[in-house]
Amino acid sequence: MAEPSPSTSKEAMLMSSELYPSVDDLPYEEEILRNPFNLKLWWRYLIARADAPFDKRRVIYERALKALPGSYKLWHAYLRERLDRVRAFSISHDLYGQLNNTFERALVTMHKMPRIWIMYLTSLTEQRLITRARHTFDRALCALPVTQHDRIWSPYLTLVSISGVPVETSLRVYRRYLLFDPSHIEDFIDFLLRSQLWQEAAERLSSVLNDDSFHSIKGKTRHQLWLELCDLLTRHATEVSGLKVDAIIRGGIRKYTDEIGRLWTSLADYYVRRGLYEKARDVFEEGLANVVTVRDFSVIFDSYAQFEQSALAAKIETAENGSDGSDDDGDKNGIDKLSKKFLEDFWLNDDDDADLRLARLENLFDRRPELLNSVLLRQNPHNVEQWHRRVKLFEGNPTRQILTFTEAVRTVDPMKAVGKPHTLWVSFARLYENHNDLVNARVIFDKAVQVNYKTVDNLASVWCEWAEMELRHKNFQAALELMRRSTAEPSVEVKRRVAADGNEPVQMRLHKSLRLWSFYVDLEESLGTLESTRSVYERILDLRIATPQIVLNYAFLLEEHKYFEDAFKVYERGVKIFKFPHVKDIWVTYLSKFVKRYGKTKLERARELFEHAIEKAPAQDVKPLYLQYAKLEEDYGLAKRAMKVYDQAVKAVSDGEKLSMYEIYIARAAEIFGIPKTREIYEQAIESGLPDNAVKTMCMKYAELERNLGEIDRARAIFVFASQFADPRSDSDFWKRWNDFEVQHGNEDTFREMLRVKRSVLASFSQTHMILPEYLMQKDQKLNLEEAVDTLKRAGVPEDEMASLERQLASSSADLSVKDESRMMNFVSAGVESRPNNEKKVNANSEDIELPEESDSDDEKIEIAQKGVPATVFGELAHKVTLDKEKDAVSEENGANAPLGALERIKRQRRQ
């Protein structure tokens, strides 16, 4: 076990004492002493000492590995910790040597574990131990099976790709790798390019392009590989021979339109490497002037800028070195000397042209936004936004801006424009205005209004901008005159001539532009007279382009000048022009103003207006009109008419507003006529077809009213009626209120009745299947019974008297059921009514079935012949029948005067 040597014996003693097991380690040490070959015990020991110093953990690891040298888990964890420990030190530190020794020890037993090999090889690569790493890679390839070689080759190629590795060594490794996996030839080509082996790279790339079965593992197309070959040939034309580079690249520019930028830069780079710098600049400029995509532009511009920077840097470096620099390569020194001899007296023959090159570079960067904008405009010359950006680029240069605006308005076709083409004309005129040249600004506007735009709104905007310019310079009359010109209707002759041409320009429809008229009327209100403003409003109404807001503005204007009747006439015209829901604001304003103005003096006219508005309004918009109408009647009319209005309102409003309308109706009726009047309204609301929740809410309020008035029986009947809409599982509030009501005002019988109703309602809500009406079910039962009897008769079985009696009973029950269904449901008192002498009177229900009193006696009974049947045949059934008869007799004696239930009535009818 290799350990760092201590500097002094004292330090060694100190370190040794720290490495001894502590008191906390004794349990683990005792377990290990008992079983030193158990991996779980060592691993538990290491986890428990995870926070201990590395030296102490190292001792534990070494002891564990001495006992278990073949444990991959221990070796991997140990090596990982040692790797993490040495990362903070320089690669020349002694700890790296100890780490390598540890890896070598591990590989004695772990030589079949690729993960250990990869960790070791990666560490050697980071230490830049090239030779040792290469030998170790070879050992790994020999030790591991061929199926795992792909895991070793990846870091091996990384190693030979490091700068400083001999090229010959890298070539040999790559060639060996291609024998293992020929599909990675692209990696080999990349390596050849990085190693500047241009000839072999070109040969390999050519062989790839000639192989029809080649498939790129990097996803490259043949076009991309062809581009790489072009780059290789152009950049290294002297090293690779045999091809006409200029013709190949220009052919590619014509053929591949999606990679024009790279091809232009390749061609320029070809001339740069040949020393033809001016030719290269011409190629760059030609490329920037022809590309149509931003990506290609960026490629060319970046290459162009890099070329200029390189030229400038080379010139500055040459000047600093004090030598005579030239732009050509070393093999052209003779040509340079000859040219200097002939151009010695010319002013252009100046070796110190660093300022010129710097100016070229600065000019190139200054031109970049303009060049980029030109690319975008070549994509779509009708893009208005790009023209605005181009003008902004020349801010501070009015001449260039004017030229750009001129080119823009000539180029952009309003029918094909992307954006708003009229903004070019407006900005053009504003440029002259900003320089106090109003004459030319008016000329621009005059030309702008003659352009055939795509929409009328664009032309109207130009007129409005022209008028606003005149307003900014205090030319108020000129602005009004412009609005009169713009809103003038074309003559009949002009219309006839345009109709003959068949292409109607937007100028023919300008006089109906709402935007233009709105601006015009605002100017008239601010600068004109009342009569001129009224004439403009009247013209808007005559053209039928007014909006509800314009109608309201016109009416407000007249009201400000005390022309109330004229304002009301405007309202009348407005309500005739528009329909709901647009006319809603006009009606509300009209009625409010009219009532406020005249009050009760013109009550009949106000009523007519309200009736007309209500007649035209849909259900969802009629509520505020009814409320205004009712308020009018309450303030200036009759209370009876107000109630009539409320009664109409609750029938006319939408279903969602009926409940709130009924609440208002009840509140007003209680305030005007008193609480008893509200009973009729409550009953009307409940029977009006409100939704179930609304009916339940109304019933609860109605019941509370009756309870406050002392009508307990009526309140109880209302609760019984409302219970059919309240599910006990979800509507606990209703049943709680009824429960409190019975606790406060009821007795044991009424409380039991409430519980019975609750159970009945719960059962009805719990049913999920479709239930037919009762009379249909009984009708079906009757038919089924008749069919069964007919079948028995046809089979020869005689019909006994009991069967005939059951048929009669089914027939009478069906008739009774039909009668019950046909009656109108209404409110009746539940139970009994109180009498002053503490007597109780059965509530008279006119719809109850009148049964004769003789039906209670047992004297008159239908005699039915029966045969004696042994009691054992019936079993418990006979006992139950006997008990039921006894209960019926007791109930008849106790409840002779009590209200009859449905079951009791049926039983008595059977006895008849």
Image: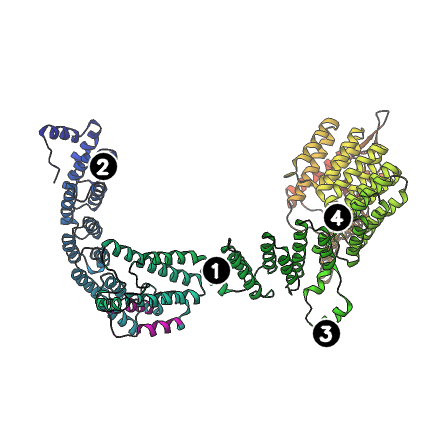
Q: Are marks 1 and 4 in contact (CB under 8 Å)?
A: no
Q: Are marks 3 and 1 in contact (CB under 8 Å)?
A: no
Q: Which SS class for mark 3?
A: helix
* Residue type at tag 2: Leu
Q: Position of residue 183 (x, y in %)?
A: 27, 66
Viewer can see residue 279? yes
User: Where residue 46 is drawn, which disc sits there?
Assistant: 2
Q: What's the CA distance linking mark 4 and mark 3?
A: 40 Å
Residue underneath mark 4: 527
Q: Position of residue 188 (x, y in %)?
A: 24, 64
Q: What's the CA distance linking mark 2 and mark 4?
A: 95 Å
Q: Position of residue 779 (x, y in %)?
A: 75, 54
- Quadrant where the N terminus sits is top left
Between disc 1 and disc 4, the foreground one is: 4
Q: Earlier in the sequence, mark 4 or mark 3?
A: 3
Q: Which residues are magenta?
A: 226-253
Query: Overall secondary structure of the magenta stretch?
Result: helix
Viewer can see residue 848? no
Q: Are marks 2 and 4 in contact (CB under 8 Å)?
A: no
Badge 1 density bin: few <14, some 14–19, many ≥20, Cα 10 Å? some
Is residue 227 found left or right of 789 in the rendered image?
left
Q: Earlier in the sequence, mark 1 or mark 2?
A: 2
Asked if 714 appears above or below 119 in the picture, the reply is above
Residue underneath mark 3: 500
Q: Earlier in the sequence, mark 3 or mark 2?
A: 2
Asked if 586 appears above or below 454 in the picture, the reply is above
Between disc 4 and disc 3, the foreground one is: 4
